[in-house]
Image (cartoon, helix red, strand yellow):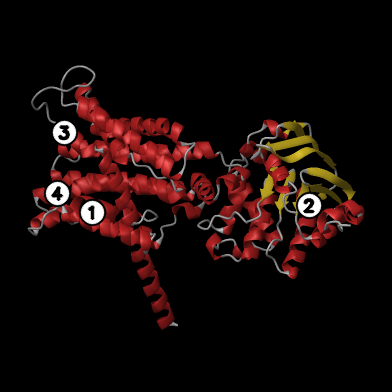
Amino acid sequence: MLEISSITVRFGGVVALNDVSARFDKPVNGIIGPNGAGKTTLMNVLSGFVQPSGGSVSRDGQDLLRLAPHRRAHWGLRRSFQKEEIADDLTVFENVLVQIDNSRTPMAEKRAEVERMLDLVGMAGRAGKIGADLSGFERRLTDVAKCMVGKPRVVMFDEPAGGMSVDESRELGALIRRIHAATGAQTLVIDHDVELIREVCEDTLVLDFGRRIAFGPTADVLADPKVKAAYLGTEEV
Amino acid sequence: MDRSLFRITRSGWAGLALAAFAIVILPSISSRFWLSVFTSAGCFTIAIAGVAFMYARLGMVSLTQVGLMGVGGWVALRLNYAFDFPFEVNMALAALTTMVFGWILALPALRMRGLYLALVTLMAAGGLEIIFATFQFPNGGDGFWGVQTGSGEAFRRPWIAQSPEAYLRYVIACAVLGFLLIELHRRLQPGRAWALIRRSEAAAMAAGVNVTLYKTWAFGIAGLLGGGAGALLAGSLGLLDDGTFRASESVLVFALAVVGGARYWQGAVVAALLYKVLPPLLNNWGVDADLAYIIFGAGLLHAVITAPDGIAGQIMGAVKGLSRRKERADA
């Protein structure tokens, strides 16, 4: 169970996250909110790129905030960015392998794991292609495979369906749902695509202006009037 | 064992063919003057490969490379006069010392990027220039600095490369080893980490890459190559002069690495030929060698505006175009 307790982040006078808490215990969880709600800031706190002024993040007894960003990756935290961060001059295989390069597992096992995950995401046939030659969707699939190698514990996706067609978004959603079964990792998904969140996430946290306004089963949360108001606004009387 | 690690690409075969030509043919057709010029070009090829590698793999601009050559040269000369070690030991120790120097230089520079990193390295080059000008290079004198008035004992060359011809062959073989070292890194874990760091430091950290370690590593490799090149230059000339290692030369060497094409081994060769062979060539043709600076400037403008991969990138592009055309014709 990933537990976020009283996370507060300040950028100068702006409070980006204000005492946010949530206990994610489902395999796939969502974080939604309007622009500027603090979703990516929360992900940056989890990744170690932003230091909170207060609060804690823990999973399996490990206080994640005490680890440097690259050590969080060694621990089992995976992150996919809004823009797929695939190195143009590395092959698909190498782009995935880099995630477990630090591991002490024998190279043959690492290569076998990369091949297995590439097969799972449907990129096995393109393993030798370089990043520069991939389409946006292929880059995203490579990114997903990268998040799945090395026994991940928590996988985070930051707006993974951005710029995708409906079919691609659906395929990606199905893939995200398979991550837990394939690796045992818990998944956090940030996206504006409410349909994707509804389809793949069991629990969802809703942020607005850095505050938690709802958290619970996705269907209940999406029906919450406060959430609708945050997304659609309220009528001025 | 990963077989792709030892796969020789077309570009690799071309490099080996060029090295074979340079080792077998070049020394036998060159006069004493040109042997010296080509040997200097060989030494600078190694140093330029180091600075180009940092720029191409990590996007880091280092303007200290010629200063680092000076460090390597100083250590090699000092060891030569202080001990009876063979040349190879002196060169290895000089390269390793310069690698450590590169790491030390990396520490303050790691927090900086782009222009600021370039400025920090330029200041380091300026500092080295002052040290070299003040204390000079060892020539067999006493004390720590080892400087005496008048010429000292001759510098000991490798026992297998006593003649100028053999020494040129030796330098070319070292340059090949330098390129292989870079290529080996590119194909292994550091190469993958560097590629991701260049893409995005945040993405690299998220992938478990220790960005500080790998950036320091890159500075170390550039230092190792610069130091080795400095030791080889000391072996070529027998003594070193502070005028060779001015900060402005480091800037020029970096600019020429961009003109040559930092991503390719051919770029380092082109840059070294422009730097060391073009000026005497112009002199031979009765043209003022300073014209080379105008050519360098035009080359840099050309690279910045139209050829970001430099002359080597254009050559590689043309070769690829030709092979594609041939494939189409065959089909």
Q: How would you rate the neighbour count of disc 2 (Cα within 10 Å): few for under 14, some for 14-19, many for 20 or more?
A: many
Task: Mark 2 vs mark 3: give the one in front.
Answer: 2
Residue A220, x across and y down, in percent = 92, 53
Q: Are dots 4 and 2 in contact, CB under 8 Å?
A: no
Whether B312 is drawn above or below A60: the answer is: below
Find the distance from the CA under tag 4 to the CA under tag 3.
Answer: 17 Å
Residue type of the residue flagged with mark 2: Gly
Q: Give the chain letter at badge 3.
A: B
Find the distance from the CA under tag 3 to the CA under tag 1.
Answer: 22 Å
Find the distance from the CA under tag 2 to the CA under tag 1.
Answer: 59 Å
Q: Secondary structure at mark 2?
A: loop
Q: Give the chain letter at badge 4.
A: B
Give the residue drawn at x 61%, y 42%.
Answer: B208
Give the residue drawn at x 28%, y 40%.
Answer: B66
Q: Secondary structure at mark 4?
A: helix
Residues at marks 2 and 1 on the same chain? no
Q: Are dots 2 and 3 in contact, CB under 8 Å?
A: no
Left of B300 or right of it: where is B289?
left
Residue B25, x across and y down, in percent = 18, 57
Residue on which the image places disc 3: B239
Residue on which the image places disc 4: B35
Q: How would you rate the neighbour count of disc 1 (Cα within 10 Å): few for under 14, some for 14-19, many for 20 or more?
A: many
In the rendered structure, find residue A36 and report the number of the disc placed on it.
none
In the rendered structure, find residue A33 and report the number of the disc placed on it.
2
Residue type of the residue flagged with mark 4: Leu
Residue type of the residue flagged with mark 3: Leu
Task: Mark 4 vs mark 3: give the one in front.
Answer: 3
Residue type of the residue flagged with mark 1: Leu
Find the distance from the CA under tag 4 to the CA under tag 2.
Answer: 70 Å
Residue on which the image places disc 1: B273
Q: Secondary structure at mark 3?
A: loop
Visible residue check, residue B27: no
